[in-house]
Image (cartoon, helix red, strand yellow):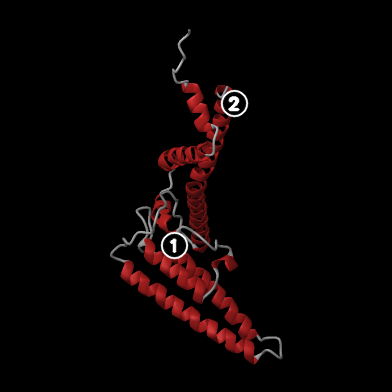
Amino acid sequence: MSKKDTKPNIKRVIADTFGTGPSLVISTAIAAAISFGTIPGMLDSDVATPDNTGTAMEESITAQHQADFAALQEMKSQIGLLEAETAFTGGSQELTDLKTAFGKQAVAAYMNLYLEGANNEGAALSEQNFEKLRTEFTETIANPAEFGFQENISAAMLDETLAKTDLNMQDGTDRFETAKQLDQQLATALEDETAKKDNAFTAPLVASVGSFLLLFMLSGFVSDTWGY
């Protein structure tokens, strides 16, 4: 009589494991471990934050910006009054002149946020202070998008952007073009930072799903091939 073969079939044991419900749990756990253990380290998800380092001129330049803002806010109030007083006559020359003066001073004050005291070594203001003043300007005076600047920028890249920009400030036109160039570069930097944040969130998720599907298909292959 032949002796009964009791040697375990390793392939069948594996197939039985991957061919059942628990294979989903195993696949998910392995996929998560692979994705969240390796993908974040491969991504450059560091996003710059505004620094708090200014120069010796920061206090005086901040005071000048605040004075410019106060003057513009006063002009804005005068414009509102004149608009109300001339509502039935369609305006007046005084109102037109005041709006023209307000526009010129507003553009000049906004350009000064970028350029006053700035050089290739960095801004006179700290990046945090720059961001604070820019927000104050936008909320109390005018949206910079109304006169050709970007609505949203990355204040955290101000010093780095100044370091690589030709700061041509010989006359008013040069100052305007230089400020616009800085503004556009900071807007692009914000887009890059946003893309990094999105990648840092979606890449591990996509990789986890991909790993799960791959492992699940592999479990089906093992079950079908080794299960018999």
Q: In terms of depth relative to the viewer, which is nearer, 131 or 179?
A: 131
Disc 1 residue type (three-letter): Tyr
- Could you tell me if the residues under marks 2 and 1 are in contact, i.e. CB atoms within 8 Å? no
At 46% from the left and 73% from the top, the residue drawn is: 136
- Label 1 element class: helix
Q: Considering the image in quadrants, where does the C terminus appear? A: top right
Q: In terms of depth relative to the viewer, which is nearer, 98 or 221?
A: 221
The number of numbered discs placed on residues in the rendered structure image is 2
Query: Is 27 on the left or on the right of 87, as rendered?
Result: left
Position of 69 relative to 221 (above/below): below
Q: Image quadrant of residue 146?
A: bottom right
Q: Residue furthest left?
A: 56
Query: Is 33 on the left or on the right of 105, as rendered?
Result: left
Q: Earlier in the sequence, mark 2 or mark 1?
A: 1
Disc 2 residue type (three-letter): Asp
- Give the CA distance from mark 2 to mark 1: 67 Å
Q: Position of residue 204 (x, y in %)?
A: 48, 44
At 44% from the left and 18% from the top, the residue drawn is: 6
Q: Residues within 10 Å of mark 1 (few under 14, many from 20)?
A: many
Position of 196 relative to 83 (above/below): above
- Label 2 element class: helix
- Residue assigned mark 1: 114
At 42% from the left and 48% from the top, the residue drawn is: 164
Q: In terms of depth relative to the viewer, which is nearer, 112 or 215?
A: 215
Q: Position of residue 56 (x, y in %)?
A: 28, 65
Which of the labelled discs sits on residue 224, or is there none? Answer: 2
Q: Position of residue 18 (x, y in %)?
A: 52, 32
